[in-house]
Image (cartoon, rainbow, N blue to C red):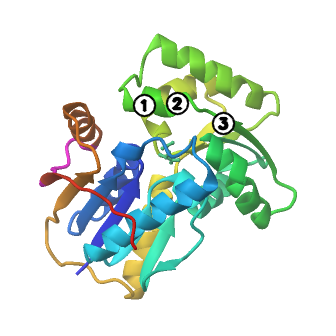
Amino acid sequence: MAKIGVFDSGVGGLTVLRELASHFPGEDFIYLGDTARLPYGTKSPDTIRAYSEQVLNFLVDRKVDALVIACNTASSQVAEKEWMGIPVFNVIEPGAEQAFKTSENKKIGVLGTRATIASQAYSLAIQKLSENAEVYSQSCPLFVPLAEEGLWEDPITNLITYRYVQPLLLYQIDTLILGCTHYPLLKSAIQKAAGNSVQLVDSGKAIAEQLELIFQSGKLSRTGKDKGEMHILATDLSVHTQTLAEQILKPLEIHQFEVVHIEPKR
Ligand code: DGL
């Protein structure tokens, strides 16, 4: 029986959950948004690593069978493929592979949080695929607040998006990685700024393909149910967060919202 734990600092990872739950409707999902400590992307690697470990431990205690780190910032600090014996999937490698496959001229742009860009996780993952690939990165610290505020289509979002995307276009990129799970919410503004000749890549679909392979290999078993359950947990749960979550996941059904407290392990 597969119960899949998915986590992000806030509502961004719900863009990954949406893909996974649509792809695997019979499985059970437990999502944790560490909203009380959002954003992760402006924090130091040590803090991001410590928070990520605490969340992973919390989800292991909830008896999940697989862990999906639906946060690029956390993924950039957690390289482990297993946590307490549970398989871990991060968003960086699938996103890098997807972008590499998509790009024809191998000039790839990356948008991400300050921490993700500073870690160079995407550049390293793409250069592992080919040393000749060119990667151009841009940190976008204002995107997460815009996404969390629900300003997905707004003149102010367009303005900020142009500011972040324009410098990358000077390098003739043909593919742009949305290297933060909040950014698919701003997809239409980003596509407008990048132009139609640039392909946008996000990791949700790529992770779903990876999980499909794991199910096929028999390492993880399906529940066999027609309809799984979706539980949304958050370390701080305002009405605003709840409304955004419903909006992002629509038409998927949320079974339960729960506020949780995450204690560092002693
Ligand atoms: N959604 C997270 C990511 O994919 C970052 C959000 C944050 O800065 O907390 O990187």
**Whole-number angstrom distance, CA of label 3 to CA of label 1:** 15 Å
Does residue 10 appear anywhere in the picture? Answer: no
Q: Amino acid at mark 1?
A: Ala
Q: Name the main secondary structure of what is drawn in magenta.
A: loop
Does residue 246 appear anywhere in the picture? Answer: yes
Q: Quadrant of residue 241?
A: top left
Q: Amino acid at mark 3?
A: Ser
Question: Seen in the image, is 85 located left or right of residue 17?
Answer: right
The residue wearing badge 3 is 139
Q: Is residue 262 above or below residue 178?
A: below
Number of the label disc, if any, that sits on residue 143: 2
At which x and y percent is residue 82? Answer: 49, 80
| Badge 1 density bin: few <14, some 14–19, many ≥20, Cα 10 Å | many
Mark 2 CB lies closer than 8 A to ligand 1: no
**Marks 1 and 2: CB-CB under 8 Å?**
yes
Q: Residue at x 59, y 41 (%)?
A: 113
**Marks 3 and 2: CB-CB under 8 Å?**
no
Given residues 49 and 120, the one toward you in this image is: 49
Question: Which element carries disc 1, helix, strand or loop?
Answer: helix
Given residues 41 and 194, the one toward you in this image is: 41
| Badge 2 density bin: few <14, some 14–19, many ≥20, Cα 10 Å | many
**Whole-number angstrom distance, CA of label 1 to CA of label 2:** 6 Å
Question: Seen in the image, is 98 located left or right of residue 214?
Answer: right
Q: Is residue 49 above or below residue 134?
A: below
**Whole-number angstrom distance, CA of label 3 to CA of label 2:** 9 Å
Q: Residue at x 26, y 77 (%)?
A: 63
Q: Is residue 74 above or below residue 53?
A: above
**Magenta segment, which residues?**
249-255
The residue wearing badge 1 is 147
